[in-house]
Image (spheres, grey):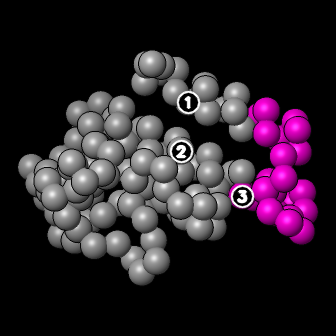
Amino acid sequence: MPTNSQRPARILRRLASATERKAPVAPGLDDHDFDQHLENEMIHLFTHEYGHQRSGLTDNTPKYASLYHTGPLPPDRQDVMVRGASYAELWGHTDPVFDGWGDERSGDHSTCRGNLVTNRLVH
């Protein structure tokens, strides 16, 4: 199992390999669209990993969702901490989102946003 520090390098190698092969993403997708989709996925993957490394965020899975991922999200969006996010989220948005109520303060660990606020000065 790769360590946290190895994950971004592994992700970059996988994405570079797909780019070199010009792997088909969807029928009719031109090079510009492919590049934009690839950039969107990289933004989400790196934000997800840094959420783990810098703020101690957990994956948004059934095991942790009721403890740390209780806030709402914009319509038709997925929390960036969802493992295996949908293609619609990864490829369609340049701005990853975290669940949150908008009024979190330091010490609130019930949402991703609360953990980010709590840990923003730790690292």
Q: Nearer the viewer, residue 26 or 109?
A: 26
Amino acid marked by disc 1:
Pro
The residue segment tinted magenta is: 16-37
Q: Nearer the viewer, residue 70 or 54?
A: 70
> Which mark is first along the chain, 3 or 1?
1
Q: Residue at x 47, y 46 (%)?
A: 47
Question: For residue 45: magenta?
Answer: no
Gap in angstroms between the C-alphas marked 1 and 3? 18 Å
Gap in angstroms between the C-alphas marked 2 and 3? 12 Å
Q: Is residue 56 shown above or below 79?
A: above
Q: Quadrant of residue 77?
A: bottom left
Amino acid marked by disc 2:
Leu
How many numbered badges does the structure rendering display? 3
Marking on residue 76: none
Look at mark 3 in the image and give the residue it sits on. 37
Q: Residue at x 62, y 46 (%)?
A: 42
* SS at badge 1: helix
Look at mark 1 in the image and give the residue it sits on. 8
* Residue contact between numbered discs 1 and 2, judged by CB atoms under 8 Å: yes
**Residues packed near mark 3 inside 10 Å, few (<14), some (14 to 19) or many (20 plus):** many
> Residue 20 location in percent, x, y?
87, 36
Marking on residue 45: 2
State left or right for residue 75 relative to residue 102. right
Amino acid marked by disc 3:
His
Q: Nearer the viewer, residue 53 or 76?
A: 76
Q: Is residue 44 shown above or below 97?
A: above
State left or right for residue 92 relative to residue 23. left
State left or right for residue 87 relative to residue 116. right
